[in-house]
Amino acid sequence: MRDMFHEELEGINTSLLGMAALVKEALDQSCIALTTADLAIAERVIAADDTIDHTQHDLDARIINLMARQQPVASDLRALVTALRISADLERMGDLAHHIAKLARMRYPNNAVPELLETTIKNMSSASARIMEKMVTVLQYRDLTRALEIEQDDDEMDKLHRLLISTLLGDEWTHGIETAIDMTLLGRYFERFADHAVSISHRVYFLVTGEYANGER
Amino acid sequence: MRDMFHEELEGINTSLLGMAALVKEALDQSCIALTTADLAIAERVIAADDTIDHTQHDLDARIINLMARQQPVASDLRALVTALRISADLERMGDLAHHIAKLARMRYPNNAVPELLETTIKNMSSASARIMEKMVTVLQYRDLTRALEIEQDDDEMDKLHRLLISTLLGDEWTHGIETAIDMTLLGRYFERFADHAVSISHRVYFLVTGEYANGER
């Protein structure tokens, strides 16, 4: 039978998963808004960011409250500190989805992404969706194989990011500076999104094994 | 007489200040490297990022250890959680200084910043140095007046950022896409740097007053 502390910890993990689901939804929808120039969807993602922020706020309050009441030590304390850090990563990932949606809104009714970069950006969307899906699995099942796999997806994201920049610098780029600025920032949002997902996976890896995953101190 | 817990907490706050000093130095030096195309300085900032990361790592371990040993509640617990969050902000600010130094190194022996943007970037450097100085005062003396002032400096940074983008889009811009990409990312680094400083100031404000500073939930 589980004691009170572990029941509450499980509740916190469930809420973290719920928050991850909100972020996943925000990312998926912001990518749709971006690639189809859908203003209504963009607006919904932008409005939903408040929900993510509130969720983090409530979750953090619960975590700190549990720390204060139950005075956990060792692995229980580490689990709570990790939960705080993961919620901060997720909140930031929500912000990045929000930025993507704002770019779609800013360029509406035009498509923010020029045809020349359509495939690259779609591939970046898919890579981030894949990363997000694995990250949720890592969170839900403490799946360490997936935790390590995410790094390969992150490498793929970095490759796509380099391809994006080289397209901006290539002879075929005829869309001028403004769109180049948009695409530079968009590339950065996707890249940072993946970084946070990797960071969450590493945190779970460390929590479970007490060791650092590849490439992380 | 102070008890053991508060002595250790004071030690942690001193270490946070030390970490802030490292980040301040990294920022100052990266701005010099950037505006004078000084490779040696850029290399030093890049190498020093490891020190900042190690400092965070050790500091976080001490904070968690203190939590486990002393089982603080209420404001003492909040102080430790806040310290964890501030160290995460500082670590990220160190990364941003590192990115600025890497840009200087990448474009060496050329100056990464074209003449047309020299003043704007120098003003962004000064704004971030000013923000950093105030943030250190907030951390050191729990100076709430400075904590609120930082928001005005952040507004100034946002204005400079908009000026930067409008320069990139103006007729006078003749430096092409590559430099526009560099400047877009550089502007983003400065902006994010300021955001983290604001976030740290808000955390201190909340810790001292139990209330949120303007504009923050």
Image (cartoon, coloured by chain):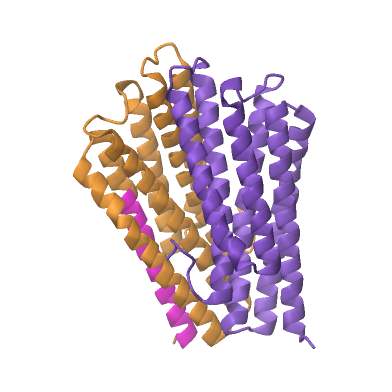
Chain colours: A purple, B orange
The stretch in magenta equals B2-26
Residues A85 and A151: in front is: A151
Q: Does the stretch in magenta take in B35? A: no
Please provide percent x and percent y for residue A39: 76, 28
Please provide percent x and percent y for residue B76: 56, 76
Q: Quadrant of the N terminus of chain B?
A: bottom left
- Left or right of A55? Residue A183 is left
Please provide percent x and percent y for residue A104: 67, 29
- Left or right of A55? Residue B209 is left
Residue at image coords 51%, 67%: B84
Is the residue A197 above or below the residue A9 in the image?
A: above
Magenta segment main secondary structure:
helix
Is the residue B182 above or below the residue A189 in the image?
A: above
Residue at image coords 63%, 73%: A80
Residue at image coords 53%, 43%: A157
Please provide percent x and percent y for residue B114: 31, 24
- Figure label count: 0
Residues B199 and A170: in front is: A170
Residue at image coords 72%, 32%: A33
- Which quarter of the picture shows residue A140? bottom right
Residues B40 and B156: in front is: B40
